[in-house]
């Protein structure tokens, strides 16, 4: 081992990580090699399908990151997440569905899908990402769906501006928040409804829309048909699906999903500390990049290898993506390529000339216009939100 | 390599080995606890916890006991039909099997779920069971309604009112006792009298 390069050798950081988080894991694998292997294989075969299923019911599934070599994520490959599963098809059929707007407005209004289609149409390409994407990487582990890398996607959303809808109802002077509720319901009434609000400023932003199309197709049922909110630059917990009710309010929405869930501590906390003290709602997406190719565990030939991926930030455009082959000691700039839109992700490439055969860990990190740099690991929080640690892929180079 | 560096690595290796031995011993204890509790706990997870979400959401967690306790408490508050004793058993089981050091991919449970231990001990049968419809309504509401809908008119599970299976008693009992696909096995959660009561109530609808 020399002091400069540690590529190919387990770094101190990952040693420590193993000590703290995964020690049991590596031990058991050694105890029962055959069973662990079988489980691994079964898991891997699930990953070759269009989506990696995390929860069967209600259906939660993430996109394999290799799909992120394309700019737009196709609808049938887009990650799926909801709390109670979609409502019955009839409830959201064009004939039965209505959007009701009420609360602190001059006049309550109802909109049919036809009404909305007659209003000015806008299309925005935007990243939609589950706030819990990457939860599985928080250490110590936290409860919730154990998303890894793919609870995110980039799509073209078409619909109407929320502010145009609100203008028809007339927002009153005492309004400060806009509450959304969808048609999805828990199987048991005692479970709190999924109700959330966003501040009026975000609701009136010219890019906040109510979308009825996704990538040029009517919004699929799993993605919120017939209408969902899109809050570009913000995490998807505000992008309410199957939207039926908008209530303009003075204060934040009440209830579990606004007052308890989808919040992070206002000040950094000790890893493992119980949730307590002041907290703020999960809103803006922190700067983040993913490595889409080569894939984890892939074997590549000695010679030039094109590394590619995507990067995005809720705080403005991505201005730089870098890759590292030495656990983050030195970084080299990748080339930003492809389409460039404010809320979309940016594709990037780096041609890597591996000089020796062996096992290599590739890392990437992004920097946004705000100057924020993707950290090696994200601040721990009790519910595991907002993970944006360096993305990491291990590949084998053969001669 | 510098001397200081060598020392650091050496102590890390020793520390790691020590931890590994401790963890292995601890792992064995936890394994015994979870194996002992598995038949009852797995019965509860299927019958009580899989009403609102599939059990894979539970099995993917790796949590310390305090957080399992808080999670089960939250589920109870939201409507999971478990007694204080059952909650306690579940927390012990879950924190032994799905603790922070447990591997990502656990070996499957050895026992078959169909053989899950009955939660309610049956008194020796004395004569044929007679279902009481008025009791059945309540038992249905607490155990079946979440999936089969209020009034058994169907939901995530099929409609049971006027369902031909009610006339095929053996098939009805077979399905309810042992489950079928996403339908939980109730042999471990309900007494035969309870099931007979539900059957009687369904027939009156």
Image: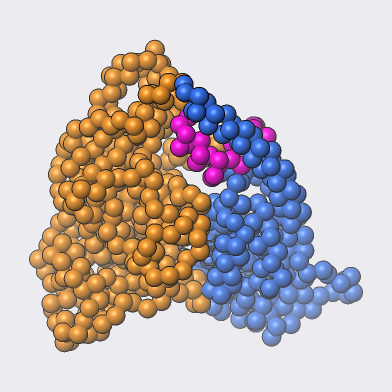
Chain colours: A orange, B blue
Q: Nearer the viewer, residue A351 or B157?
A: A351
In this image, B123 relative to B86: left or right? Answer: right
- Magenta span: predominant SS is helix
- For this orientation, the residue located farthest to the front is B3
Residue at image position (59%, 56%) is B64
Residue B31 seen in the current view: no
Spot the residue most to the left: A120
Residue at 26 percent across and 82 percent down: it is: A250
Residue A125, given in percent of the width and then of the height, sits at 19, 52
Quadrant occupied by the C terminus of chain B: bottom right
A88 part of magenta stretch: no
Is A379 positioned to the left or the right of A117 in the image? Answer: right
Please report the residue visible at 69 percent of the width from the left and 42 percent of the height from the top: B22
Q: Is residue B23 visible?
A: yes
Above or below, A242 against A42 in this view is below
- Residue A262: x and y, percent? 38, 65
Stretch in magenta: A10-38
Residue A202, image x, y percentages: 20, 68
């Amino acid at each position: 081992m020399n002091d400069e390069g540690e590529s190919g050798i387990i770094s101190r950081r990952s040693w420590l990580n193993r000590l703290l988080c995964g020690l049991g894991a590596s031990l058991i694998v050694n105890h029962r090699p055959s069973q662990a292997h079988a489980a691994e294989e079964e898991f891997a075969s699930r990953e070759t399908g269009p989506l990696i299923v995390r929860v069967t019911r209600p259906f939660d599934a993430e996109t394999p990151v290799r799909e992120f070599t394309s700019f737009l994520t196709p609808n049938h490959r887009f990650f799926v997440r909801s709390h109670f599963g979609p409502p019955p098809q009839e409830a959201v059929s064009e004939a039965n569905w209505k959007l009701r707007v009420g609360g602190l407005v001059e006049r309550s209004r109802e909109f049919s899908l036809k009404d909305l289609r007659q209003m000015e149409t806008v299309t925005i390409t935007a990243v939609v990402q589950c706030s819990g994407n990457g939860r599985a990487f928080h250490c110590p582990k936290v409860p919730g769906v154990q998303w890894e890398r793919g609870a995110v996607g980039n799509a073209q959303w078409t619909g109407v501006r929320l502010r145009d809808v609100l203008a028809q109802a007339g927002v009153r002077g005492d309004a400060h928040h806009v509450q959304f509720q969808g048609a999805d319901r828990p199987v048991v009434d005692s479970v709190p409804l999924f109700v959330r609000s966003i501040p009026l400023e975000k609701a009136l932003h010219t890019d906040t829309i109510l979308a009825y199309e996704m990538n040029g197709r009517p919004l699929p049922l799993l993605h919120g048909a017939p209408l969902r909110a899109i809050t570009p630059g913000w995490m998807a917990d505000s992008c309410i699906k199957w939207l039926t009710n908008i209530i303009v309010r003075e204060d934040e929405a009440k209830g579990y999903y606004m007052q308890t869930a989808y919040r992070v501590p206002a000040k950094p906390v000790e890893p493992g500390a119980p949730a307590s003290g002041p907290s703020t709602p999960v809103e803006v997406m922190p700067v983040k990049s993913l490595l889409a190719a080569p894939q984890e565990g892939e074997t590549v030939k000695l010679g030039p290898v094109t590394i590619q991926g995507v990067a995005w930030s809720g705080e403005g455009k991505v201005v730089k993506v870098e890759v590292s082959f030495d656990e983050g000691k030195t970084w080299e700039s990748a080339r930003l390529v492809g389409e460039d839109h404010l809320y979309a992700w940016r594709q990037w490439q780096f041609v890597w000339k591996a000089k020796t055969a062996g096992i290599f860990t590739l890392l990437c990190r992004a920097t946004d216009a705000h100057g924020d740099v993707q950290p090696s690991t994200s601040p721990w929080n009790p519910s595991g939100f907002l993970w944006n640690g360096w993305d990491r892929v291990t590949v084998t180079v053969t001669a | 390599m510098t001397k200081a560096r060598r020392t650091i690595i050496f102590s890390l290796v020793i520390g790691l080995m020590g931890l590994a031995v401790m963890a292995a011993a601890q792992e064995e204890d936890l394994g015994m606890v979870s194996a002992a509790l598995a038949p009852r706990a797995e019965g509860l997870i299927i019958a009580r916890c899989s009403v609102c979400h599939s059990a894979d959401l539970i099995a993917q967690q790796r949590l310390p006991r305090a957080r399992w306790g808080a999670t089960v408490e939250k589920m109870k508050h939201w409507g999971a039909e478990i007694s204080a004793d059952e909650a306690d058993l579940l927390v012990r089981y879950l924190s032994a099997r799905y603790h922070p050091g447990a591997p990502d991919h656990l070996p499957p449970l050895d026992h078959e779920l169909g053989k899950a231990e009955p939660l309610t001990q049956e008194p020796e049968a004395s004569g044929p069971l007679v279902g009481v419809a008025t009791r059945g309504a309540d038992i249905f509401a607490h155990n079946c309604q979440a999936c089969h809908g209020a009034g058994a008119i169907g939901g995530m599970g099929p409609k049971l009112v006027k369902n031909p299976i009610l006339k095929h008693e053996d098939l009805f009992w077979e399905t309810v006792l042992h489950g079928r696909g996403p339908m939980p096995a109730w042999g471990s959660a309900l007494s035969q009298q309870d099931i007979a009561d539900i059957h009687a109530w369904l027939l009156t609808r």
